[in-house]
Image (cartoon, rainbow, N blue to C red):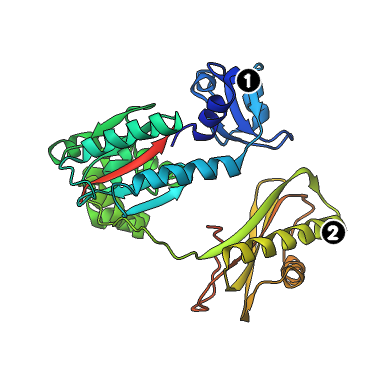
Amino acid sequence: MDAFYASVEQRDCPEYRGKPLVVGGSHSRSVVAAASYEARKFGIRSAIPVRKALQLCPHVIVAPPRFDVYKSISLQIRSIFNEYTDLVEPLSFDEAFLDVTENKKGITLAQDIAQEIKQEIKSELHLTASAGVSYNKFLAKIASDMQKPDGLTVIHPKRALKIISKLPIESFWGVGKVTARRMHELNIFTGKDLQGKSPRYLVKHFGKLGIHLAEFAKGEDHRLVEPFRERLSVGCERTFREDIYDRNEIFDKFDKLANELERRIKRADFQGYTFCLKIKRDDFKIISRSITVEHTLHAAAEFLQLGKELFQSVNLENHGIRLAGFSVSNPENKETDHSCVDTQLLIPFEWE
């Protein structure tokens, strides 16, 4: 979903409509959570610092986020989805996959379902939605990005390979900045370049991801829509207004993180055995440490103690700390989790 938060703010505040607006925090290290289409004309995009947005457009409106409101609207949209199918896989507040091969209303064409859902969202919530329709997740997601805002794109199997051949490699699932650079070094810039490489070649250079890339290049994606996902971790992190060097001040921040993590653990009714500490230095280097215990973790006092113990092995090399995070994972105690991750016809919806 593009500009979901920004579109909600413009919907609720008439004075924001038609003006460049970003949703983000007020302190100097806040990042843009969403940018309106008016703001995008100035080169503003989500995830850039708010201060950069203000440089690009000094008169841009900065609206504080209202996540409770966005969550409430997201649930309303999901209830609309459930009128058509129970096979809904939410990816975030603003994006979901739907499998409508068999739908509750007996509608034959997926694109007709997509159009009905778009109209229902607009009439009930006064927001527009973009949808992509195709025969697998990868292509449905690609389709949903092709005509925004308020778009509806269908990728038919007969057109799939031609469309894939024209895609920049950055559009492929799993390809981030680092992987894209490696691909460019191998003269892989588009889907057509990817189609010219053998699965063996891609696995050699990109490991398990290479298997998926080889399939995507052929228009294949075997992932199913998964309505229910097991929660694998609960975490929280904070970016500080200023870099912190003093150990006592760092531990004060740890104490706040520990209490916040306890609240989230209780709210999620989650039990895990692995605690993870995440540190981002002022040079943006990320350091993580984890430990697995024999009992489930749920108390702030224990989070604080483990955080302090793990911090002893963190070498700051005279750098300050920009960000700190705590998380709990490994719900079944099957193995130590060192990743520290916080967390048919298909229609991926992205509501504006």
Residue at x 53%, y 73% (from the top left corner):
331
Q: Where residue 254 sits in the image (x, y, percent)?
A: 77, 60
Looking at the picture, how far across and down is residue 304, in whole percent? 76, 67
The CA span between labels 1 and 2 is: 38 Å
- When asked about the image quadrant of residue 249, the answer is bottom right
Instruction: Using the image as rendered, state which of residue 198 and residue 18 is in the foreground.
Output: 18
Rendered image quadrant of residue 29: top right
Q: Quadrant of the N terminus?
A: top left
Question: Which residue corresponds to mark 1?
Answer: 60
User: In this orientation, which residue lies closer to the viewer: 212 or 193?
Assistant: 212
Q: Quadrant of residue 290?
A: bottom right
> Which residue has dot 2 on it?
247
Q: Looking at numbered disc 1 in the image, what kind of residue is underneath it?
A: Val
Residue 344, horizontal then vertical, whole percent: 20, 51
Q: Do tag 1 and tag 2 residues touch (Cβ < 8 Å)?
A: no
Location of residue 208 with respect to 88 vertically, above or below:
below
Dot 2 amino acid type: Arg
Local crowd at mark 1 within 10 Å, few (<14), some, or many (≥20)?
A: many
Horizontally, is 157 left or right of 320 in the view? left
- Please report the residue visible at 33 percent of the width from the left and 31 percent of the height from the top: 119
Secondary structure state at the residue bearing disc 2: helix
Residue 328 visible in the displayed image: yes
* Foreground pick, 249 / 9: 9
Q: In the current view of this chain or complex, which residue is farthest to the left?
A: 158
